[in-house]
Amino acid sequence: MAEVENSKDLISVLWSGADILRSKMDANEYKDYLLGIVFYKYLSDSFLIKVYDLLYDEKPGSLKEALDAYKEALEDESAEELKEQLTEECHYVMEPELTYTYFADAARNNSFNREQLQKGFNNIEQSDPIFADLFTDIDLYSNRLGTGDQKQSDTIASLIKEIDKADLLNSDAEILGNAYEYLIGQFASETGKKAGEFYTPQAVSKILTRIAISGQEEKKGLSVYDPCMGSGSLLLNAKKYAAEPGYIKYYGQELNTSTYNLARMNMFLHGIVPDNQHLRNGDTLDADWPTGEETEFDMVLMNPPYSAKWSAAAGFLLDERFSDYGVLAPKSKADYAFLLHGLYHLKNNGTMAIVLPHGVLFRGGAEGKIREKLLRSGSIYAVIGLPANLFYNTSIPTCIIVLKKHRDGRDVLFIDASKKFNKGKKQNEMTDEHIDEVLELYSKRKTVDKESFLASFDDIEKNDFNLNIPRYVDNFEKEEPVDLNALLLDIEKTDQELGQVQGEFVSLLKELTSSDAAIMSLLHDLIEKMEG
């Protein structure tokens, strides 16, 4: 319970930091400032805690105490040795006057200088390739922060003071990671359409992860890959369900640089050690990655941009990811290009789960040919229809396609989960109960009336390789038979009531009078009509 409380406290402090910026810019911009400065505090606090631990083999009573101990240690003759040890363990070294604790103190005394914070950012970025260009989205000299040097500096100082209330000293990686996740979710809600670029709703993430990790939970050194990773939330879900989370290796690629930086911060804030992070800023379809030692993974998780455009250049027919299929995904719809990229990087005994629009299940042309080839090879293991309006950037219903390589059968499990949701104000929501129901149907792998259908290869071939879920799962609810006698009695009763009301109305009309002959004539005609 204390963990939940700590997490809530942390969230409210961080969210109040957003209030300082909310009136100045939209959420898509201020998220970079807020999350970047929170991350700098995390690096600084972790560093001072580590310094104190190396000096005294215990946790400091406060960050101020740790900073004072650090200043003192730097005057000692063994200072260089301490710095070497810190570089090895933290991958960076901070000077005392570049620590967040120092900045917060300066902000409270009205002596904060944003040039120092910029220096701090640069220092971290240059200390190790894993931090390269990490803070590039934070413009400390932007006019959005206010007009003129003083106002801009004051805005940053206010933000630093507010975020300093977050107690990271007594918050473990899980609490901090969850608070960061929550913030990313809140930004996604505020930014609406743009959110699809960096956020997969938690319910969808949970289903994808639990399906892909199923049967692999005990594996030590599990590898997980997301070639469209956004802020990394989907990748990080794996640690919630793995028996050996500390050994998971994360591989991810993201096209948008700001979002890529967000994912890198998210990894650190969840306590993922640098050696287990393999993240890249690049275009997943244009050039294959990874191509080094590790190219196939136990789990592949994907929520790519739906029906995105891509070049579909003829040269891709020679690309190993696509060459087996003889055709390429159409230029206007890269859905199958993303799917085949993910499948290519899946281990023979691994599982892939990808979210796509329903069109991939039934569209013809090149997509139909790719789908048929996948079905003939037994690669498509399950198709799950999700409720509409789950995502921030689109209201269309989506589906999850589960893929495996080199399995014995060619049957496909269809699950219709389109009605498993609670209606929300902006988005529909799937609860943990709904998710458990989907997972139970998935693991049973049987036909359940109105919910799932295990289709043989013959069933699918007879349907011309069309995977549209209603062809296999009939979720039509029969209406109750109508009792005609009861209906006639209802009609008679209604007629009687109408006659009674009409009679009372005519009586009222007869009581009306007017000195205007024309009005009286009209009134007389109306009464005649109603009585007639």
Image: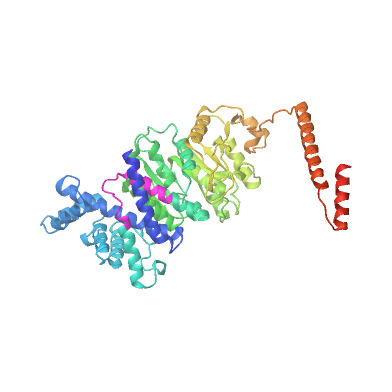
Residue 215 spot, x, y in % from top left: 43, 31
Residue 235 spot, x, y in % from top left: 42, 44
User: Relative to 266, is 471 above or below?
Assistant: above
Coloration of the structure image? rainbow
Residue 355 spot, x, y in % from top left: 53, 43
Residue 377 is covered by the magenta coloring: no
- The number of callouts visible is 0
- The single residue placed furthest to the left in the displayed view is 77
Q: Quadrant of the N terminus?
A: top left
Q: Is residue 290 visible?
A: no
User: Relative to 475, is 423 above or below?
Assistant: below
| Residue in front for this viewpoint, 340 or 354 | 354
Residue positioned 52% across, 38% down in the render: 403
Residue 110 lies left or right of residue 332; in this view the side is left
Residue 94 lies left or right of residue 489; in this view the side is left
| Residue in front for this viewpoint, 377 or 218 | 218
- The single residue placed furthest to the bottom in the displayed view is 148
Residue 308 lies left or right of residue 24; in this view the side is right
User: Relative to 158, is 179 above or below?
Assistant: above
Residue positioned 79% across, 44% down in the render: 505
Q: Quadrant of residue 30?
A: bottom left
What's drawn in magenta, residue-wise? 162-184
Residue positioned 39% across, 53% down in the render: 15
| Residue in front for this viewpoint, 129 or 287 | 129
Residue 119 lies left or right of residue 34; in this view the side is left
Residue 525 spot, x, y in % from top left: 88, 50
Residue 166 is covered by the magenta coloring: yes
Residue positioned 44% across, 36% down in the render: 213
Q: Quadrant of residue 515?
A: bottom right
Dominant secondary structure of the magenta stretch? helix
Q: Quadrant of the C terminus?
A: top right
